[in-house]
Amino acid sequence: MPRSLSPLSVPYRVLQRGGGLAIGLAFVLGGGVNLPFLGPAGPLIVLAVAGVAAVALVGYETAYVRRFSYELTADTLDIDSGVLSRRSREIPLRRIQNVDISRNVIQRLLGIAVVSFETAGGGETEAQFRYVTFEEAKRLQKELARLKRGGTADAEGSVGEEPAAAPTEPESTELFALDRSELAILGALSIDFRVPGILFLLVSTLGSTVVSSYLSAVPGVALVVLAGVLFAAVAVVSWIVGAAAAIVEYYDFRLVRSGDELQYERGLLQRYDGSIPFDKIQTLTVADNPLKRHFGYATLYIETAGYTPGGSSGSRGSEAAIPLAKREHVLDLVEELEPVGDVDFERPPRRARRRYLVRSLLAVGVLTGILYAADSLLSLSIPWWPPLLLVPVAVLYAHATWRHRGRWLGEHHVVTRNGVLRRKTKIVPYYRIQTIIDSRSVFQRRLDLATVTVDTAGSLSLGGGDAAAVDVSGATADHVRTELEARLGLAVDAYRVGRAGIGIEDEYEQNGDDSESGSRGSESASLDDGESGGRSIADDEPGVRRDSTAEDESSRSGSPVDRTRDGQEGEDPDTSRGRDDPDD
Amino acid sequence: MNRLHPRIRLLWIGRSLLTAAIFAGIAFGVGRVVDPAWLPAWAPLAVFVAFGGLGATFAVLRYRSWRFEVREDSLYLERGVLTRVRTVVPFVRIQHVDTSRSPTERLAGLASTVVYTAGSRGADVSVPGLTPGDADDLRERLKRLAIRSEGEDAV
């Protein structure tokens, strides 16, 4: 049976649309703006026009809300909408990536909410319900998840694991909640870098004359002090704004696992309430910076193909993220979402470090050069040598770049880590690989190095943030390339058989890994800095969790683990290539 | 490993000569209008030769570096002069395949095949310099292979 929007949406929509108009009208009438061309009856005419507009608006919004109907069927979401031009849409449920509910303060008072459905295609939200009651929004979210489970089971026959994984009313387990102290730390670490720009703009447009006349009146020393005070003030303001924004945005952040979906809630004034199906997760990113590393915190981003980065509300792409949590916490959650197991990063070869050294020294050199040129050409009395003091920093930075860079091929995931000041560890399930790109610049070729980039459909990757194994040796790059391709094939095979190659059901990470032959095999916080390295990928493979594999097969029999190994070592190319059979 | 049609060199050289001609035109215009003292009369010619020569060299080198292969499970491309890029596009990840012929390509009697994936790099994968027949063949072949490999959605 088709349903319609909440009747309360009519007044809300009218107020929302008409609010601006009303304020404008009040300004025109109250401010006594002169309307000579309308004659003495001017205000009356304005009022009449406004009255007609108001009636039209109410009429339109009523019609819109009455026309809008939607229905959840077994495998589609049907929407009929539109007043003047009608539109009927059917969105296949399996194509829906995320369902988000948002409510601002007024909507919360009225008990209504906006529901947005995201799909992978297109640059914007696929469908939005403005507005339904909050209960209905929650029902939609739940019902959709339920239908999707039922739908996949129907479509793919006896999938088997579905009922076990998802009982009719899936139990919810809280995965993560941002407590007060974490929120405080998050606020403290959030600086809004846009504020200085805005302040600068304000000052330069409003107060330029005042400032310049003031500036000419004060002596030089005072000027320096003033600049210092100003700088400090701007810094404090940006910090306060950033902290306030972060606290408002992430107040009472909760991440709940419900069946095979991830649900989050956050926000002080505007509440967000969203769901992410596990099987839509493209990439997990653990990000940190030196400060967070030092205090043992990290940030987690969960990427699906549904959100458009830089979209309407700025942070669309990272809405499904843990803003800040203890590192172990984040790693536990990663393990829960994508059981990567112990990650043992392998660093680039040492000769790569030379590149970084040359690069950072070049930066210092260029800085010195600019200062020197400015010094000699413009005859300013600035000394040109201070940048040279940065040389040790450059050396350290080069070393750190090398030390933090790494890649790892696990059983189901490829993990890469890059960056020092903003370090990102990307976890990509083999199944999510779209294309594999191996590029070697002239300078890389001189040292026989290569960069292997793994392209996924994740939305954050648009900014060039794809997972990449940077500066691996040429031979390794060849190996990684073929390896990734083979493993994608196996993962797709496993998925096609109906047993997802990646999945939350995997419990193997709890089986420990005593068989790990590495030098630090038993350390569990493996995404932390590893000092080992130096082992080749080929070495990694045979020893990894051999004991757990057997149990694995009973619990998730289709895992590509065993087969991966075959393909990996090239013993049985038929297993990995057999899927070319058209009957498959 | 397949290579591109040799005529693609002419196309690329032609394009770079066109670019060079535009730059030479700018140099000529500057010489005519602004007429700076340091700009000799032969500057446009020098600009044309420099840019054209560079472009032509790159075109030839690019042609030499280009290889592609339809492998068992994937399309493999290798190209690039300064940065050597090798791309692997698994058939399971192909969303759709196009052939396209730009005006210059039509002039040279060539076509390109463009492969789309759901990846964030979208239309990054295109094979230029095919004869129209070959381009259509490649498209059909990739299409068949993509259907046969029957990828589940990764998104």
Image (tube, rainbow, N blue to C red):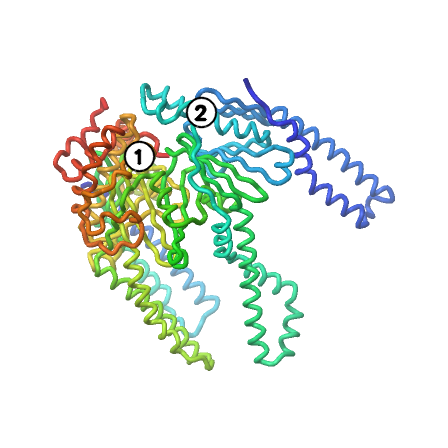
Asked if the residues shown at circle 2 and circle 1 are in contact, with their CB atoms under 8 angstroms apart, the answer is no
At horizontal 59% and vertical 32% (from top left) the residue drawn is: A130
* Residue B8, horizontal then vertical, whole percent: 27, 45
**What is the three-letter code of the residue carrying label 2?**
Glu
Residue marked by disc 2: A169
Q: Which mark is residue A502?
A: 1
At horizontal 45% and vertical 41% (from top left) the residue drawn is: A320
Q: How many marks?
A: 2
* Subunit under mark 2: A
* Figure quadrant of residue A209: bottom right
Classify 10 Å Cα crowding around label 1: few (below 14), some (14-19), many (20 and above): many
Q: Is residue A320 visible?
A: yes
* Residue A55, horizontal then vertical, whole percent: 74, 31
**In this view, A85 is above or below A293:** above
**In this view, A515 is above or below A520:** above
* Figure quadrant of residue B88: top left
Classify 10 Å Cα crowding around label 2: few (below 14), some (14-19), many (20 and above): few
Q: CA distance from mark 2 to mark 1?
A: 23 Å
* Subunit under mark 1: A
Secondary element type, mark 1: loop
Which of marks 1 and 2 precedes in the sequence? 2
- Front disc: 2 or 1: 2
At horizontal 48% and vertical 68% (from top left) the residue drawn is: B34
* Residue B113, horizontal then vertical, whole percent: 30, 38
Secondary element type, mark 2: loop
Residue located farthest toward the right when viewing the structure as drawn: A40
**What is the three-letter code of the residue carrying label 1?**
Ile
At horizontal 50% and vertical 22% (from top left) the residue drawn is: A72
